[in-house]
Amino acid sequence: MRDAKAQKVLIWNGLGFVFGFTLVFVLLGATATGIGRFMLKNNELFRYISGVVVIVFGLFHMGLIPVSFLNREKRFYYLGKRPGIISSMLMGISFSFGWTPCIGPVLSSVLILASRSQTVWRGIGLLFVYSLGLGVPFIALTIFLKYMWKYLEGIYRYMNAIKIASGFILVVIGISILTNTFGFLATL
């Protein structure tokens, strides 16, 4: 019975953690869209800059170019007496600000797309979907942790291939932004 209760607490804390970083990312999406409207006056210039930045992030993510400041990580430590949903939410918020080496290039690329969105709601939607993509594995992990523990260590051997593949996708997106063909890619 204790295991079921512990798993329920773990799931609620996982949901709090995901809610915390989703809140920050959605607010970033709304802000990026607002700033994007301002940048619309210089659309061509910012399209080129955005495309180049996304390509650089993709090459960095693949490990082909070093960008030392993107490898810095800031962590906040909270040593409360009992972890609960509020502390988990605060950890999720901290995570969104401090865990950039792993998510920075992809997050930045999504923020660039959000800044080019026609409406604030579309920018919010992009960052919400990004948060779902990041959060669903966390929630699945909390639900199935006791069954998956021995298999999780095996994923690490594929981490380099995963980074290269996701970096390649960023480069393709960056090129499509640069060449103004992203709309065509989005229809596919």
Image (cartoon, grey):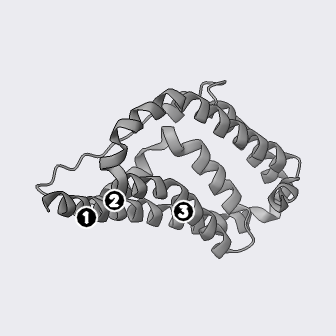
Left or right of residue 21: residue 91: left
Q: Is residue 2 left or right of residue 10?
A: left
Pair 3/2: label in front: 2
Q: Quadrant of the N terminus?
A: bottom left
- Tell me the SS state at disc 1: helix
- Which quadrant holds the C terminus? bottom right
Tags 1 and 2 touching, CB below 8 Å: no
Q: CA distance from mark 3 to mark 2?
A: 21 Å
**Residue under pointer 1:** 8
The residue drawn where x is 39% and y is 32% is 153
> Residue at label 2?
14
Residue type indicated by callout 3: Leu
> In front: mark 1 or mark 3?
1
Q: Earlier in the sequence, mark 1 or mark 3?
A: 1
Taking depth in this image into account, of 115 and 110 the one nearest to the observer is: 110
Front of the two marks 1 and 2: 1
User: Does residue 87 appear in the picture of this structure?
Assistant: no
Disc 3 crowd rating (10 Å Cα; few below 14, some 14-19, many 20+) is some
Pick out the residue farthest to the left: 81
The answer to whether residue 162 is seen in the rendering is: yes
Side (left or right) of 12 relative to 4: right
The residue carrying mark 3 is 28
Residue placed at 46% from the left, 53% from the top? 137
Query: In the image, 156: left or right of 148?
Result: right
**Up-down relation of residue 59 to residue 39 (above or below):** above
Nearer to the camera, 45 or 161: 161
